[in-house]
């Protein structure tokens, strides 16, 4: 017999309503994605507060090109997560934006004109060439050379991320991961500017090795010791899948909240709802889980504000 659930309540907001109260209102609104949003905030709040839980955050690199970088940085500064899994672009943008600046643009700009001006376009974010490729080459070659001269001939991606973080500043998510001993793993590190610079470095120093298996040793060390695990997954692709993949080795995530713009009709991993991962053993059958269809730069600041309010209490 189907349980019809609670009555749908109208949302009531006035000038004194706190953001935490707004999320409480959403939980009873019956309002399509708003319920998933409210549920996700509850899941994250409980996951972050659970002392037995190994906490993952995964995110796609493109968001680091936007102001959302500040929210990601603050979540790591707050020590809300133990492990971050991301893409090479996140490293590229963190370095580039620490040492330079990106510009505001629009989705409708003329890409031929931008190419003539040596400006890359990432959605509505403009990336001057001088702020990206040449800058990242200069910095990465210097960082790697310093490690090499100190006798380091082999590094995992987690060690690469710590190396970068210690050379950046408080505006950087990699800096706060380094500062708070949060491991950042980049399973697809060769797919980006930082990865290309690692390869270029090996051409000059053929005894230097990138040890991807060492990242697996690191993650297995976390997973096999975890009493519980949870993940906040921002966007799909390899960062989401790597998070789910490793958690199958402890019978799945106990908490999972996923934000995506992808749809599931094409069978893609990015479009797959969290509940699909239950069938693979990547999320437990009793997990507290939710999927929110939303564009993350519009919604994460509000989620962060609600979490700060809830966790302070």
Image: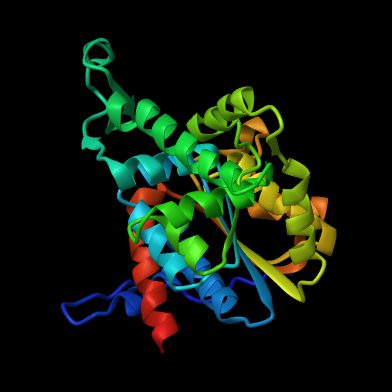
Of 290 and 300, which appears nearest the observer? 300
Say which quadrant the C terminus sits in. bottom left
Using the image, determine if residue 21 lies above or below residue 76: below
Q: How many marks?
A: 0
Could you tell me residue 85's position as x and y percent? 60, 51
Could you tell me residue 226's position as x and y percent? 76, 72
Say which quadrant the N terminus sits in. bottom right
Residue 152 in view of the camera: yes
Using the image, determine if residue 40 lies above or below residue 278: below
Of 159 and 249, which appears nearest the observer? 159
Left or right: where 186 falls relative to 250: left
Residue 248, located in which quarter of the rendered image? bottom right
Could you tell me residue 64's position as x and y percent? 40, 46
Of 81 and 265, which appears nearest the observer? 81
Residue at image coords 78%, 63%:
221
Residue at image coords 57%, 43%:
149
Could you tell me residue 293's position as x and y percent? 48, 49
Residue at image coords 51%, 76%:
45
Left or right: where 103 falls relative to 87: left
Of 137 and 9, which appears nearest the observer? 137
Left or right: where 209 falls relative to 109: right
Q: Residue furthest left?
A: 15
Residue at image coords 24%, 75%:
13
Residue 245 in view of the camera: no
């Amino acid at each position: 017999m189907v349980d019809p659930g609670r009555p749908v309540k109208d949302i009531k907001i006035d000038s004194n309503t706190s953001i935490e109260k707004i999320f409480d209102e959403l939980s009873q609104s019956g309002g399509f994605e708003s319920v998933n949003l409210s549920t996700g905030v509850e899941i994250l709040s409980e996951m972050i507060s659970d002392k037995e839980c190994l906490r993952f955050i995964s995110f796609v690199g493109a968001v680091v090109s936007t102001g959302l970088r500040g929210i990601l940085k603050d979540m790591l500064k707050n020590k809300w997560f133990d492990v971050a899994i991301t893409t090479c672009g996140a490293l590229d943008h963190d370095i580039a934006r620490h040492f330079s600046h990106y510009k505001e643009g629009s989705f409708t700009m003329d890409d031929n004109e931008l190419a003539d001006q040596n400006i890359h376009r990432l959605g509505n974010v403009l990336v001057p060439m001088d702020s990206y490729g040449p800058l990242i080459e200069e910095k990465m070659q210097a960082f790697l050379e310093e490690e090499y001269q100190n006798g380091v001939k082999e590094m995992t991606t987690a060690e690469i991320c710590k190396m970068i973080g210690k050379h950046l500043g408080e505006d950087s998510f990699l800096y706060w991961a380094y500062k708070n001993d949060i491991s950042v793993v980049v399973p697809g590190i060769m797919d980006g500017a930082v990865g290309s610079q690692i390869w270029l470095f090996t051409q000059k120093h053929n005894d230097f090795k990138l040890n991807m298996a060492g990242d697996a040793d690191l993650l297995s060390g976390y997973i096999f010791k975890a009493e519980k695990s949870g993940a906040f997954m921002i966007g799909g692709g390899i960062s989401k899948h790597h998070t789910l993949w490793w958690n199958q080795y402890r019978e799945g995530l106990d908490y999972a909240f996923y934000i995506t713009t992808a749809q599931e009709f094409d069978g893609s991993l990015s479009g797959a709802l969290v509940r699909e991962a239950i069938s693979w053993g990547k999320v437990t059958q009793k997990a507290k889980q939710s999927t929110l269809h939303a564009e993350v730069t519009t919604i994460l600041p509000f989620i962060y504000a609600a979490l700060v309010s809830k966790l302070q209490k």
